[in-house]
Amino acid sequence: MKPIIRLITEQDIDATHAYFSAVFAEHLPTLITRERPQAPEVSAGYIRSHLGDHSAIFIAIIGSQVVGNIAVTRQALGELRHRASLGMSVAQPWRHQGIGRALLQHGIAWAATQGIERLELEVTTNNPAGIVFYESAGFVREGLHPRAIKRNGGYIDLFAYALEIASPSQPIACDPSL
């Protein structure tokens, strides 16, 4: 069954909260875990913070069930507003069926219409499927954040990735003596 992918609305808060709860309950080593289930009002606040023209959440829906999402969160400060961060997930039964790719395409297209030039994300180094997915979509690894996540007394590193989606403006010449 092919999903419907669209921008989230206030009416999707309950279904999306149920989706978030299910994904976090998987305790995937590739996600930032939650120590306890996320409260409905936390999900609602997160969703509401992405309504409007500054940020967006797209959801993938099959029937009445949310099966995936992508959040595009634009930087708030003026000199950083050309950048946005991405976060996405797909529910376990629906992975490897093209839903993630479709969500990513919607997120990139929306960002381009908003004048966002650069999309950034982080991937845990223990997520080879995510690394292959983002690299196949054109994201470029730009760095490593060592010991970025502390879990169960150990550490997980994060790779930093970015995708340039619009021609950046001419760089400003800087005086190296400053």
Image: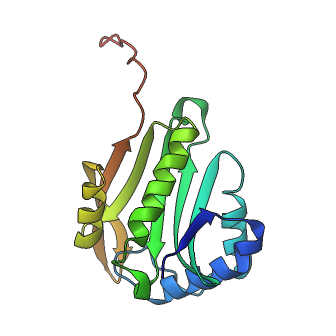
The residue shown at (42%, 83%) is: 94
Q: Quadrant of the C terminus?
A: top left
Q: Most extreme residue toward the right, as rendered?
A: 11
* Image coordinates for residue 6, horizontal then vertical, percent: 61, 63
Q: How many marks?
A: 0
The residue shown at (41%, 86%) is: 92
Pick the front one: 109 or 28: 109
* Image coordinates for residue 163, horizontal then vertical, percent: 35, 45
Image height of 107 relative to 89, above or below: above
* Image coordinates for residue 56, horizontal then vertical, percent: 61, 55
* Image coordinates for residue 58, horizontal then vertical, percent: 58, 63
Image height of 102 relative to 97, above or below: above
Pick the front one: 146 or 59: 59
Q: Is residue 174 left or right of residue 37?
A: left
**Residue 98 visible in the displayed image:** yes
Q: Is residue 40 left or right of residue 59?
A: right
